[in-house]
Image (spheres, rainbow, N blue to C red):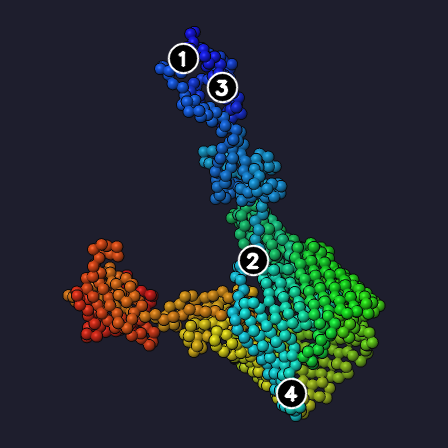
Amino acid sequence: MRMTRRQKRHGGWRPHAIALTTTLYLLGATRAAAQPPLPFADTGADARVAAGVDLGGGSNAAAGDNAGDGSGGTAPASVRSGTQPAATTAASRAVAGRDLYLEVMLNGQRTSLIAHFRERDGKLSATAKDLSELGIATDKLGAADTATLELDQIAGLRYRYDAAAQSIDMEVPDAIRKPYTFDTRELIATPNATSSRGFLINYDAFAQTQSNAQLALWSEQRYFDPAGVLSNTGIAYLYSDLHRYVRYDTSWSMSNPATLSTTQFGDTISSSLDWTRSFRIAGFQWRSNFALRPDLVTFPLQALSGTAVVPSAVDLYINNVRQFTGNVPSGPFIVNNVPGITGAGEATVITHDALGRTISTTLPLYVDTRMLAAGLSSYSFEAGFLRRNYGVESFSYDPSPAVSATARRGVTDSLTLEGHAEATGGLVNAGAGALVRMGMAGVISGSASASAGKLNGAQLGIGYQLIEPRFSIDAQTLRAYGNYGDLGARDGTPVPTATDRVTLALPFFSRQTLSLSYIGYRFPGAPSSRIGSLSYTLNFGNLASLTLSTYKDFLQHDSQGIFLTASFGLGNNTAINASVGRQNGQSTYNVNAQRPPDYAGGWGWGVQAGGTGAVPYRQAQAQYLGKYGEVTAIAQDLDGQASASLDMSGAVVFMDRTVQPARRIDDGFALVSTDGVANVPVLHENRVIGTTDTGGHLLIPDLNAYQHNQVAIDSMNLPADTRIATVAMDLVPQSHAGVLAGFRVSRYSAASVILRDADGKLMPPGTRVHHVESGGDTIVGYDGLTFIEMLQPDNHLEIINGGAGDAQRAVQCRVEFTYQRPADGTLPTIGPLTCRAGASTHAADGEAHAARTAPTAATPSAVR
């Protein structure tokens, strides 16, 4: 074989070709099992190299000659351009794998999801994030979201890849599937609570006919705005021999729903635990406030779990009462926040599949609302000066500063820890406690605290509570040793040296209950008391009950009594109660009947007669609950001494430049405004509660703070020329604050106009009309009718030839007419008006008339 000069100079091309081909084969060998390699220019090269065949001869020599000859052949394009040959590209793809986007089936159920997978060496992999979105619990596999997991390496997971259908069917055991979770108490997300700016006065005036003509007026002055609430309460005594005002509490408070905390400056009451005491203090308080999230469940609730082989319906029963119904997909599921019980009970989860098969699972439950859920904490911190002579003196405080701190933490669902500390001049007190749930056996509690300084001592407490459907017991005892004291004792109110409480309830059958209780107190320097009581109640449906009760103080032999009470419900919110008994050696009896006023307002009444020993008494009262408050009149006779009293309560609100009288306002409220439109019906939670006054206002006095409150107006009775931005609002007021609910109600000027051409024929449908004064365009409907808005006293219409974008658009004719808004709010019909070229036709020419019509929409039905 003869070699050219170029072949000689380069040492021959055949060894290089053989080496290159062999290298490419070795790089792509692992890919061969997954897919056939891409062909070389010489399609037989792969097989010959694999068989060890020397490529230097035969036709290859001829090919090589052609390739090496500058005239007889050309080198491959990849070689000429310096790019990777096709064989090299195929090998690289075999190493890196390829992307697949597959429809996913999970345990034979279609997920309607397409996921990204990676195929390499015939095996599939995916990122942990993609697998998690498919319902696989990758956190149990210890994989980060960005990690790539090979499906073959996940224990228990099997899959079938269908290349033709571009789908994958994955069989995943429940152990590594993410359970479907639903919350039985789940609520719609509440918007951020708001507050408008305003001022209100609550009042309660009481007058009684006696020799000194008693008159007392309790009042609260409250300013509120988005930053917080400033409140002051007190009572004014206007007696014939006494005129004075006693201040109760003055404070500024602000809350933060994001941190569930409330900060208060001024007079407040400290937080307490079962084994500590509260006290009044003036200064600063910072505390957790779970009321800012009414949907938050603070106590531990068991989660119920199960598995559905196929998509199923789930029913949850608590003590045989259905509490929840929902649907779950196939696989594991969890029911959170199981509702409906306090104490011990039974939960039953029932699943129903499409074939009617039913699976029932029953589990025991125990719920104690005193405990905190795992991870939840509550706290309270107070600093200031102790209040003295509350209700007697307005500004009586201890000169020594005092501090107090209380904290609780749910360590687990079965363990809640508590701590408390307080200090003032010459006294330090601190202690800790715990509540422990013992499975279904109830909750045991304990506490220990000590004081040092001027009052040295200790206090120990232990308690136990178990609530069963047929049995409940609640017992607690506290013992103080030495000269134990707290802030109240430092201020003159000693701590009881012994406090005992035991309550036992035994429901019989479904209508009877037997209750026993014991209460014991022992104070330093005061007579001790140990009172036992027994009560038996028999219910006759929901309308009648009979109760027999007795009590006795075991340390004071003359203190005892026995009573028999019967209660009857007569319907229509009317009830009768009668009791007879004997107490401390004297006979007693009482008979009363009453019917309180309805929430919507109206009259209520009550009568009562009774006596103790030889002293009889009689009483009659009448109540009226109205839009602006409540009035109660009472006449009574006690042992021949007649008297009468009158009580009036309500509120006055200053808001939105108006003064609104209302019922007493204890929490959030709303002032509805309809922009001056009177007699608009207002609905609260789909119930009509009144109509707006002449200024377009109505006050709703009893909204729930930090909760959804649906308020709406009924627009059906509004005039036809009324435009309303919205007819319903979801109001969420802040605590003790008001919200302005502004329904933008406005009137607009519009009319239907009948147009005809110069020949007296009605304008054909589709004719374009331009209103000069407003600049608006419209069209003519059937019967020559068109609807014009934003009318002025003098109006001009132009009939247009051509469309809005037509270059040939021109004025065909014109119409002129006057307009005056009807006093009754209707939308008039004007015309027919004749449209004339080059001239205007006035509605007063004798051919126009106005017909009052009741429109059904913004555009009359005639314009179709």
Residue on which disc 3 sits: 20
What amino acid does circle 2 point to? Glu
**Marks 2 and 1 close (CB-CB < 8 Å):** no
**Marks 3 and 1 close (CB-CB < 8 Å):** no
What amino acid does circle 3 point to? Leu
Q: Earlier in the sequence, mark 4 or mark 2?
A: 2
Q: Earlier in the sequence, mark 2 or mark 3?
A: 3
Disc 4: CA contacts within 10 A as few (<14), some (14-19) or many (>=20) = few
Residue on which disc 1 sits: 65
**Marks 4 and 2 close (CB-CB < 8 Å):** no
Closer mark to the observer between disc 2 and disc 1? 1
Of residue 131 and residue 57, the one placed in the foreground of this image is 57
Mark 2 to mark 3: distance in Å?
68 Å
Q: Position of residue 178 (x, y in %)?
A: 58, 46
Residue 703 sits above or below residue 349 on the image = below
What amino acid does circle 4 point to? His
Residue 236 lies in quadrant: bottom right
Residue 295 lies left or right of residue 556; in this view the side is left
Residue 54 lies left or right of residue 793; in this view the side is right
Identify the secondary structure beneath mark 2: loop
Identify the secondary structure beneath mark 4: strand
Residue appearing at x 58%, y 58% in the figure = 185
- Residue 549 seen anywhere in this rendered image of the structure: no
Residue on which disc 2 sits: 186
Mark 3 to mark 4: distance in Å?
114 Å
Residue 343 lies left or right of residue 605; in this view the side is right
- Residue 149 seen anywhere in this rendered image of the structure: yes
Q: Earlier in the sequence, mark 2 or mark 1?
A: 1
